[in-house]
Image (spheres, rainbow, N blue to C red):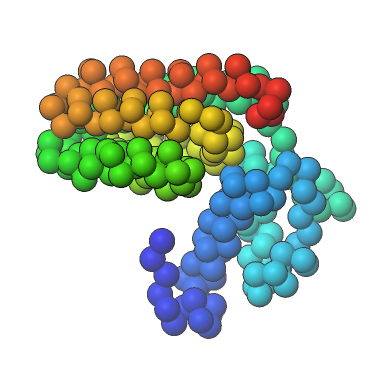
Amino acid sequence: MSIDAAERKTGKGRRGQKSRTEEVLLEMRTRIAEHDLPPGTRLQELDLAHQFNTSRTVIREVLGTLEQRGLINRIPNRGAVVARLDPKEIYEIFDIREALEGLCTRQATMNAPPETWDPYIELFGPAMEKAIVEGEVEQYIAALEELRSETIRWADNTHAANFLDLVLDKARLIKRRVTLLHGRAEIGREMHLEMLKHMRAGDAAGAEEIKKRIISSAKEWLERYRSFIM
């Protein structure tokens, strides 16, 4: 996110106001996705305004956007609470991701120069395997986000990108919990490496099929360890 330094400092003007709103929104989305604000947490406008050193107008705009995304529920005269996801909604999100991320993987493979994927093949290689063995799963999670962003960028499909943006906030918490299950990160790394090799070879259909299999596999792990994760 690009924010003009002077506007960030002063917060003056319409553009500065918008930038500050986006900044706070991004931080709130991250806190909810990473479970720093778990489901059921109450959110008060005044408390958040003090916390972020900003106006209640900005916080009100942020809460409105979070509500539109389904990340919070606003209760009249009582503030807002972080929303809970029910199992049906979670499984539906996996199905949506499987279709849309598979599509983006295929389109990115067709659009990007083959060498685009070389740094990612290296990223998911032996060094990542070693990091996972040593328990550095956060490094793997960060790599997944980086690869997803690059894939969506090269897919150049605005509608798919917008729909994914709406569901990924809700998906990240569950994805993180699944990834932290013993053995899951290494299986995911191997599958992503296989997918990237198909992308490097220009095999769009093969890459799409593996991406769908990755998400389907994660859904199966979720079902297997449902009582532990949810």
Q: Using the rendered image of the protein, determine whether residue 149 is visible from the camera's viewpoint.
A: no
In the displayed structure, would residue 135 be above or below residue 26? above
Relative to 191, 38 lies left or right: right
Q: Nearer the viewer, residue 4 or 226?
A: 226
Picture quarter containing residue 105? top left
Residue 147 percent across, percent down from the top left: 33, 41
Residue 201 percent across, percent down from the top left: 13, 27
Residue 140 percent across, percent down from the top left: 41, 42
Relative to 203, 138 lies left or right: right
Residue located at (32% from left, 20% from top):
210
Q: Which of 171 and 141 is in front in this view?
A: 141
Q: Which residue lies furthest to the right in this view?
A: 77
Residue located at (45% from left, 33% from top):
185
Q: Using the rendered image of the protein, determine whether residue 6 is visible from the camera's viewpoint.
A: yes
Residue located at (40% from left, 75% from top):
4
Picture quarter containing residue 223? top right
In the displayed structure, would residue 202 be above or below residue 8? above
Q: Nearer the viewer, residue 227 or 204?
A: 227
| Position of the N terminus by quadrant | bottom left
Could you tell me how many numbered marks the image carries?
Answer: 0
Q: Nearer the viewer, residue 185 or 161?
A: 185
Residue 54 percent across, percent down from the top left: 65, 73
| Position of the C terminus by quadrant | top right
Residue located at (28% from left, 31% from top):
193
In the displayed structure, would residue 100 be above or below residue 4? above
